[in-house]
Amino acid sequence: MEKNMYTNRLHGVVIPTITPMHEDGTLDVPSLEKYTEFLIGTGINCLYPNGTNGESLMLTKEERETVAQTMSDVNAKRLPIFIQCGSMTTEETASHVKHAVKIGADGVGIMTPAFFTMDEEAMFEYYSDAIKDVPTDFPIYVYNIPGCTTNDVTPTLLGRLMNTFPNVIGIKYSCPNLMRIEDYLRCCESKPDILIGCDSLFLQCLITGGVGTVTGPGAVFYKRFNRVYRQYMAGDLKGAQETQNQIVKLDRQLAGIPGIPALKTMLKQRGIIESDTCRKPLRKLTQKECDTIARVIENYDKEEENIHE
């Protein structure tokens, strides 16, 4: 099946969702439901639960299934939803993929094996074992974040996977390397969908030939990310560049503050989730960091009020 025949694909502004927790570290399902409903109303393009920002590798298998099921139920097919299924074992990864199919997700992303260094053959076997029983009309995205996992999906490996499994249709790449995006686009005859995991390179990825970004901060600063995509798609490159510069400014203002706790703090400050608790050993932010975030959000709100579209 050609990739353009899939009804839903990752594209535009994709939100890798956080996992709300109570103060005791257990899942906060009511906040997750509220958060999901909030995201659906922001105008973003796709939902991506159980990725890095969702603290997935620190959740149990049952907790991850609860997150996927809850978000899928609340979403009710209003937005494309792709479940990140990569885990520390091949068996659990394959189980999450099957669960995503069962609950009616639009597709999955699968992170590479983590921590233990794998060569290309080992990673090919990992992906093969994880998706061999998946229906051929169920789209798969590779998730490559080598700075965290230590394992890098080369263009050669991506091409091999796409040539072997027609429903492997793209990759989420979380490195600031536009040359690699060029190489991915040439890895096989069927050009992959490429999404960048670096906010500061959203527009550059689109210009290079990518299809979108996977952005945690996009859950809070969605107006800006949506505008970049809308302007680019409308051919307004000058406007898109100006908006991208504003995103870069936000990125720099938040530099040095731990990313996942920062996202939860911002969402709590917005009244979308009840607690900013993360799964330990992730920590809560200091008061100084919270104050910095509050100023950034206040300035963002003021700047957005003056933008007329």
Image (cartoon, rainbow, N blue to C red):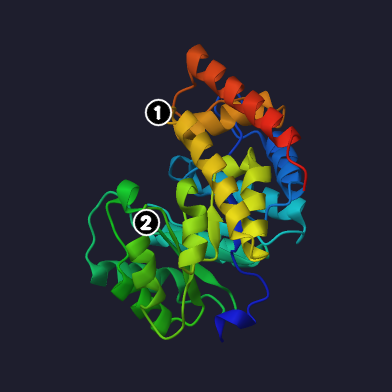
Decide if residue 293 is on the left or right side of residue 36.
left
Residue 32 image label? none
Most extreme residue toward the top is: 287
Residue type at tag 2: Thr
Depth order, front residue of 136/95: 136
Seen from the viewer's position, the closer of residues 61 and 153 is 153
Image point 77% across, 48% down: which residue? 309
Placement of the N terminus among the 4 image quadrants: bottom right
**Which image quarter: residue 80?**
bottom right
Q: Position of residue 119 (x, y in %)?
A: 22, 65
Left or right: 35 in relation to 115? right
Q: Is residue 279 visible?
A: no
Identity of the residue drawn at 73% across and 40% down: 307
10 Å neighbourhood of mark 2: few (<14), some, or many (≥20)?
Answer: few
Nearer to us in this view, 257 or 84: 257
Instruction: Please state which of the two labelled residues, at mark 2 or mark 1, is closer to the viewer.
Output: 1
Q: Position of residue 238 (x, y in %)?
A: 59, 55
Mark 1 closeness class: few <14, some 14–19, many ≥20 residues within 10 Å: few
Count every numbered label the image shows and give the total.
2
Q: What residue appears at the point 49 percent right and 21 percent down from the top-left corner?
A: 284
Is 75 situated above or below 80? above
Q: Which residue is tagged 1?
A: 256
Q: Using the image, determine if residue 59 lies above or below residue 82.
A: above
Task: Give the label on residue 89, or none.
Answer: 2
Indicate the quadrant where residue 78 lies.
bottom right
Give the answer, above or below, for where 223 lies relative to 212.
above
Q: Amino acid at mark 1?
A: Gly
